[in-house]
Image (spheres, rainbow, N blue to C red):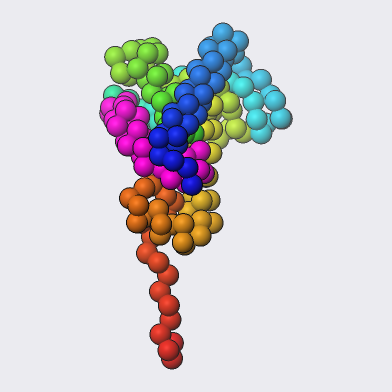
Amino acid sequence: MVRRSTSWFLILVGALAVVAIDQLTKQWAIANLSQTERIAIVGDALGLHLVFNPGAAFSLGANSTRVITAIALVVVLAVFPVLAARVRHRWIGVGLALMWGGAAGNLIDRIFFEPGGFAGHVVDFIAYFDWFVGNVADIALVAGAVIMIAVAFFMNDGAARASADSGSVSASASMPAPRKPERGE
């Protein structure tokens, strides 16, 4: 457990660190990688290949970039700050910081990169097999989600109930307490 004011500040610092690393690596990729050539790092499993993605994950919603940008803007500027202010569990804070930073990193691309007008393309450059190409923000989003899911599975019921009673965000605060079997069941 951490104090709310401390956790909010630490979550914000963590999110800003993710944004900084994401944006620096994207600038490096733009300056050093090609859209036509893939550089193998670990055979076909992992490589570097510059792609400008107008959509969301796996290029889904490529024709809805402005809608994706509007949703991301609300999540980054309204939803994440509210959640961060309510976090009482350290690992939930870590997961939230990673997800907030990842979402903000990709949002920056959508606002400021070509073609502009809230329809910018996200810079992707880490190629996984021939499946998809991602970036540091994507890695942070996935890692944050995995941490939050893991906490939901492994957090003890007492901590979950205490967090739920205090109105804070925890992995399993919305999950009901386990039911005790009745005699004869």
Residue drawn at x 40%, y 59% as measured from the top left: 161
Which quadrant holds residue 28? Answer: top right
Taking the view exactly as shown, the residue that stands out farthest to the bottom is 184
Q: Is residue 101 above or below residue 113?
A: below
Residue 96 in view, yes or no? no
Left or right: residue 165 compared with residue 41: left
Residue drawn at x 44%, y 51% as measured from the top left: 171
Q: Which residues are magenta?
A: 67-95
What predominant SS class does the magenta segment belong to? helix
Q: Is residue 169 above or below residue 107?
A: below
Residue 120 in view, yes or no? yes
Q: Relative to the observer, which residue lies in front, 180 or 52? A: 180
Examine the structure image and report whether residue 90 is included in the region drawn in magenta: yes
Q: Is residue 140 above or below residue 52?
A: below
Q: Relative to the observer, which residue lies in front, 92 or 102? A: 92
Location of residue 180 in the rendering, given as x and y in whole percent from the top left corner:
43, 77
Taking the view exactly as shown, the residue that stands out farthest to the top is 31
Q: Is residue 102 above or below residue 91?
A: above
Location of residue 183 in the rendering, given as x and y in whole percent from the top left corner:
42, 89
Location of residue 11 in the rendering, given as x and y in whole percent from the top left corner:
46, 33
Q: Relative to the observer, which residue lies in front, 34 or 95? A: 95
